[in-house]
Image: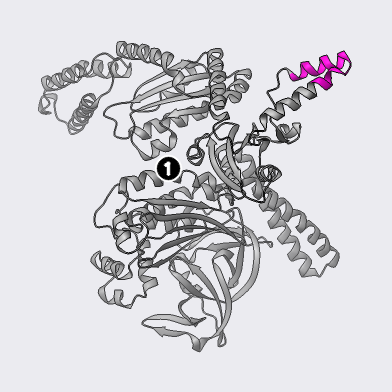
C-alpha cells in the first residue's frame, strides 16, 4: 500500500507524465482497491483476498520505468521551442495587420507567437488543437494560425502555430491553456513589436513595388474597411461581387481564394479590374460604397498616377503663395499622411466613432424586450376590439407602427450575410473534388442575403452534408460525364434567395440525379419498407426515403459519405430551425435541394388556428393554403385519407388525431383544412377554425415538453393564453 501511495503522489505532483502504461496501471490499482474493499465488507481476512503484493509492486515499477521524469524534459523542449519561435516568427506575413497591431499595442496588448504539439498517442489531435485556438480567442485576438481553424476541422494535424495579440502575460496565457488535455507542450514567445513593425513596413513597400505596374491597363481599386468591422472577409467578398457587375476582376490582393476562405482579416485590400463598356470611374465608387462598413476607396486609373503627382506638385506650388504661418501649418498636417491616389471617395471622419461593438447577449435581451412589446400590443388590440374603443384603436395603430419599426431595426442588427457561412465551402469543394478525382465548377449566388445569426450558426452542418452528397453521389467523374454527352466539368451551385418573409438556400448539381427505383430497392434491402409498400410509392415519395435515419445508397462507406446520417441530420436540423427541406431530382439531369428557412427564430409570423377552444400556431412559411372542403371529398386510398388538391392527391389528417386527443365535435359537412408543405410533401390538416395570421414570439419548451414530437415551441397570445407551436413535419 505504501508503494501505491508513493506512485499516486508522484503522478499528482506531476513528477511523471501520464502515458498509456501508467494509465493502465492506475486502472489496475483501482480494481485491486475495489476488490480489497469488497472482500473486507464480506468479512474476509487479508490473506483470503488472493492479492499478490509482489505483482502490484512489479506493475508499478514497470509503469515508472516506461516514463522518464517530466520536469527536465519539458524544460529542454520549451527552451528548444523558444529558440525556434525567436528565429522563425518572420515566416508569418503580418503586413495586413499592421494597423491592428499598432492600435492594440497602444492599448496595452502584446504580440505573441505560440507553438503547441499534441501527444503522439492522442486520437483526436486536431480537436485538441482547436481547443487551444478557442482558449486563445478567450484571452486575445488571433491574427494568423498554421494550420487555420478551417483546416483543423477538415484534416488531422499534430502541431499548431499562432500569432496573436493579448493583454495577458505569458504566465497567465500558460495557465489558461494548461487545462487542454493531451497536449505534449505549449511554448509561448513574446515578439519584439518594434522589430515586427519594421518588417511590416518593408514588406508593404515591397508589395507595392511588385504590384504597382503589374497590370498597366487595369484600374487599381484600394478599399479600406472600418477599423471596427468584424466580418472583414465577408465585406471584401461583397465588394468583389459588386465590382464583377460592372467589369472584369483581373487580380486581387490578397488573392480572392484567401478572401473566399474567410482567412482575410485586414482592413485594406486591392482589386485590379477592367471596366465594361458604358461604365465610368464613378460607377466603381458607387459599387464599393454600397457595401456596409467601408471607410475609404481609392481608385487609380491606368497611367494616371504620374499626372496626379504633377497636380500635387502644382498644388504645392500654389500653397507657397499663402502666408508662411498657414503654409507651415499645412506642411505639418501633411507630413504623416500617405501619398494620395488620383480618385478618392471618403466617408466622414466621424464614421469610425459611429460604429461600436456590442455583446450578442445584449442584442438577445433587446430582442426579448421587443418580443414582450409585441405580446403587449396584441393584448391592447384585443381589449380595444372587445370594447369597441375607436380612439384606443387609433393609438394602438400608431404604436404598432413604432413597434414594427423597432422590431425590424433590432432584427437587422442580428442579421449576418450568408457569405459568413458560404465562404468556407470553396476550399472544401476544391479539396473534395480533387480527392474524388472530379472536375467541379463551384458557383455561389446571393451571398449578400442576410439571415438571423441564430439561424445562420446552425446552417453550416446541413450544408456540409448536402455539398458532400452532391460531390460524392451526384456529380459524375469526367470520363463518365463525357460518355453521356455532358461537359467534363460538373456544376455545383450554392444559392441564397429571399422570398417574402423567408430565405431559400439551394444546393443544386447537374449530376446523375436520384434514381427512385434504386431508392426503393435499397429501402427494401435495409428493411425500411416492405416490397409491397415500395411498389405503391410514387417517385417523389421514394426520393423522400433518403431522409430516413440510416438510409444510404452508397455501396461502401467512405470518408465522404455512406454512413446514412447525412440527410437525416439535414432534415432534423432544418426543421428544428422552423424550416423545411424539399428535394427535386431528375434521373440523369441533376438534383436540387431547397432549404426553406425563416429570417429569424425570435419573432415569426404564424397562422393561428383553434381546436377544442385551444389555440395552436403553425409557422406561416410552411403554410400553402387554407381551404374548405366537403366531408365527402375525403377518400380512403389504401388505408390513408386523401383529397384532390389542385390536381394533386395529398394525404389528410385530423389535428386532434395528431395530438392524440379524444375530443369529438359534431360538425357539418364542410371542413376547414390547412394545407402545409413539409419535407415529405404536401399535407392537409383538418382544424375547427382558422383565426388568422399574427406575429408571435417563440419561446422554447423545457422539462417534459422539450422532446415531445410535434411541438416546436410555445408563444404567449395577447390575452395571456399560451399557444403551442406545432411541428407537423412528422405527421
Please state the horizontal and vertical placement of residue 601, each as a whole percent of the image.
57, 54
Find residue 337 and report its image quarter.
top right
Q: Which residue lies furthest to the right in this view?
A: 323
User: Magenta residues?
Assistant: 317-334
Find residue 364 and report its image quarter.
top right
Secondary structure, magenta segment, majority class: helix
Within 10 Å of the Cα at label 1, are there few (<14), some (14-19), or many (20+) other Cα atoms? some
Viewer-proximal residue among 71 and 699: 71
Viewer-proximal residue among 163 and 645: 163
Q: Is residue 706 left or right of residue 217?
A: left
Q: In this view, does 556 lie above or below 542?
A: above
Q: Does any portion of residue 706 appear in the rendered image?
A: no
Please state the horizontal and vertical placement of residue 626, each as a whole percent of the image.
58, 76
Viewer-proximal residue among 439 and 273: 273
Q: In this view, does 714 lie to the left or right of 67?
A: right
Residue shown at 54% from the left, 46% from the top? 419
Label 1, secondary structure: give it: helix
Please state the horizontal and vertical placement of residue 723, each as a whole percent of the image.
59, 63
Find residue 217 and report its image quarter.
top right
Q: In this view, does 70 lie above or below 20?
A: above
Q: Is residue 195 left or right of residue 533?
A: right
Residue shown at 72% from the left, 51% from the top? 406
Q: How many labels does the image show?
A: 1
Please state the horizontal and vertical placement of residue 660, each as a whole percent of the image.
46, 70
Residue shown at 71% from the left, 26% from the top? 309
Q: Give the residue pinned by disc 1.
A: 427
Where the C terminus falls, by quadrant? bottom left
In the image, residue 322 lies in the stretch drawn in magenta: yes
Q: Is residue 224 above or below residue 387?
A: above
Viewer-proximal residue among 694 and 141: 141
Amino acid at each position: 500500500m505504501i508503494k501505491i501511495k508513493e506512485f499516486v503522489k508522484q503522478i499528482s505532483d506531476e513528477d511523471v507524465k501520464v502515458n498509456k502504461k501508467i494509465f493502465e496501471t492506475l486502472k489496475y490499482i483501482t480494481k485491486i482497491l475495489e476488490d480489497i474493499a469488497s472482500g473486507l465488507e464480506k468479512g474476509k481476512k487479508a490473506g483470503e483476498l488472493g492479492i499478490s503484493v509482489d505483482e502490484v509492486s512489479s506493475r508499478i515499477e514497470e509503469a515508472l520505468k516506461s516514463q522518464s521524469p517530466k520536469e527536465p524534459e519539458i524544460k529542454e523542449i520549451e527552451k528548444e521551442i523558444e529558440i525556434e519561435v525567436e528565429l522563425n516568427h518572420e515566416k508569418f506575413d503580418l503586413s495586413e495587420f499592421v494597423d491592428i497591431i499598432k492600435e492594440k499595442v497602444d492599448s496595452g496588448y502584446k504580440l505573441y507567437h505560440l507553438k503547441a504539439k499534441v501527444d503522439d498517442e492522442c486520437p483526436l489531435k486536431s480537436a485538441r488543437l482547436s481547443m487551444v485556438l478557442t482558449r486563445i480567442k478567450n484571452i486575445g485576438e488571433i491574427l494568423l494560425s498554421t494550420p487555420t481553424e478551417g483546416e483543423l476541422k477538415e484534416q488531422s494535424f499534430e502541431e499548431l502555430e499562432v500569432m496573436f495579440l493579448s493583454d495577458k502575460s505569458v504566465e497567465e496565457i500558460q495557465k489558461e491553456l494548461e487545462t487542454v488535455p493531451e497536449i505534449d507542450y505549449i511554448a509561448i514567445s513574446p515578439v519584439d513589436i518594434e522589430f515586427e513593425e519594421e518588417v511590416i513596413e518593408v514588406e508593404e513597400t515591397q508589395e507595392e513595388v511588385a504590384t504597382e505596374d503589374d497590370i498597366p491597363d487595369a484600374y487599381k481599386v484600394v478599399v479600406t474597411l472600418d477599423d471596427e468591422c468584424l466580418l472583414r472577409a465577408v465585406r471584401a467578398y461583397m465588394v468583389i461581387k459588386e465590382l464583377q457587375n460592372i467589369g472584369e476582376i483581373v487580380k486581387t490582393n490578397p488573392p480572392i481564394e484567401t478572401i473566399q476562405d474567410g482567412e482575410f482579416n485586414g482592413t485594406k485590400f486591392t482589386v485590379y479590374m477592367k471596366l465594361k463598356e458604358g461604365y465610368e470611374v464613378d460607377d466603381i465608387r458607387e459599387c464599393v460604397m454600397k457595401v456596409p462598413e467601408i471607410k475609404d476607396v481609392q481608385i487609380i486609373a491606368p497611367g494616371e498616377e504620374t499626372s496626379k503627382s504633377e497636380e500635387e506638385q502644382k498644388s504645392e506650388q500654389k500653397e507657397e503663395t499663402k502666408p508662411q504661418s498657414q503654409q507651415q501649418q499645412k506642411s505639418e498636417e501633411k507630413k504623416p499622411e500617405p501619398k494620395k491616389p488620383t480618385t478618392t471617395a471618403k466617408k466622414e471622419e466621424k464614421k469610425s466613432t459611429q460604429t461600436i461593438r456590442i455583446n450578442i447577449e445584449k442584442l438577445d435581451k433587446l430582442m426579448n424586450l421587443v418580443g414582450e412589446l409585441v405580446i403587449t400590443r396584441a393584448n391592447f388590440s384585443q381589449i380595444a376590439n372587445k370594447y369597441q374603443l375607436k380612439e384606443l384603436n387609433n393609438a394602438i395603430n400608431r404604436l404598432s407602427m413604432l413597434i414594427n419599426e423597432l422590431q425590424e431595426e433590432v432584427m437587422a442588427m442580428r442579421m449576418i450575410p450568408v457569405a459568413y457561412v458560404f465562404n468556407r465551402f470553396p476550399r472544401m469543394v476544391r479539396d473534395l473534388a480533387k480527392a474524388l478525382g472530379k472536375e467541379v465548377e463551384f458557383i455561389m449566388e446571393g451571398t449578400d442575403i442576410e439571415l438571423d445569426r441564430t439561424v445562420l450558426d446552425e446552417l453550416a452542418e446541413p450544408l456540409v452534408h448536402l455539398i458532400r452528397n452532391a460531390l460524392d453521389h451526384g456529380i459524375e467523374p469526367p470520363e463518365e460525364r463525357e460518355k453521356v454527352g455532358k461537359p467534363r466539368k460538373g456544376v455545383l451551385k450554392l444559392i441564397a434567395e429571399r422570398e417574402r418573409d423567408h430565405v431559400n438556400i439551394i444546393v443544386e448539381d447537374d449530376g446523375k440525379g436520384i434514381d427512385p427505383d434504386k431508392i426503393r430497392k435499397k429501402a427494401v434491402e435495409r428493411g425500411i419498407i416492405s416490397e409491397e409498400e415500395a411498389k405503391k410509392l410514387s417517385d417523389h415519395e421514394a426520393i423522400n426515403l433518403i431522409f430516413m435515419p440510416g438510409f444510404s445508397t452508397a455501396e461502401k462507406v467512405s470518408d465522404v459519405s455512406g454512413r446514412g446520417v447525412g440527410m437525416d441530420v439535414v432534415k432534423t436540423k432544418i426543421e428544428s430551425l422552423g424550416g423545411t427541406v424539399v428535394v427535386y431530382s431528375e434521373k440523369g439531369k441533376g438534383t436540387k435541394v431547397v432549404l426553406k428557412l425563416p429570417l429569424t427564430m425570435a419573432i415569426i409570423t404564424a397562422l393561428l388556428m383553434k381546436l377544442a377552444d385551444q389555440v395552436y400556431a403553425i409557422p406561416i412559411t410552411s403554410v400553402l393554403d387554407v381551404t374548405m372542403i366537403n366531408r365527402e371529398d375525403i377518400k380512403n386510398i389504401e388505408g390513408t385519407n386523401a383529397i384532390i388538391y389542385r390536381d394533386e392527391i395529398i394525404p389528410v389528417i385530423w389535428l386532434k388525431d395528431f395530438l392524440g386527443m379524444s375530443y369529438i365535435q359534431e360538425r357539418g359537412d364542410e371542413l376547414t383544412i390547412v394545407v402545409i408543405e413539409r419535407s415529405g410533401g404536401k399535407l392537409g390538416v383538418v382544424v375547427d377554425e382558422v383565426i388568422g395570421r399574427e406575429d408571435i414570439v417563440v419561446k422554447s419548451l423545457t422539462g417534459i415538453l422539450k422532446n415531445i414530437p410535434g411541438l416546436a415551441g410555445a408563444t404567449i397570445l395577447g390575452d395571456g393564453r399560451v399557444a403551442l407551436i406545432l411541428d407537423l413535419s412528422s405527421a
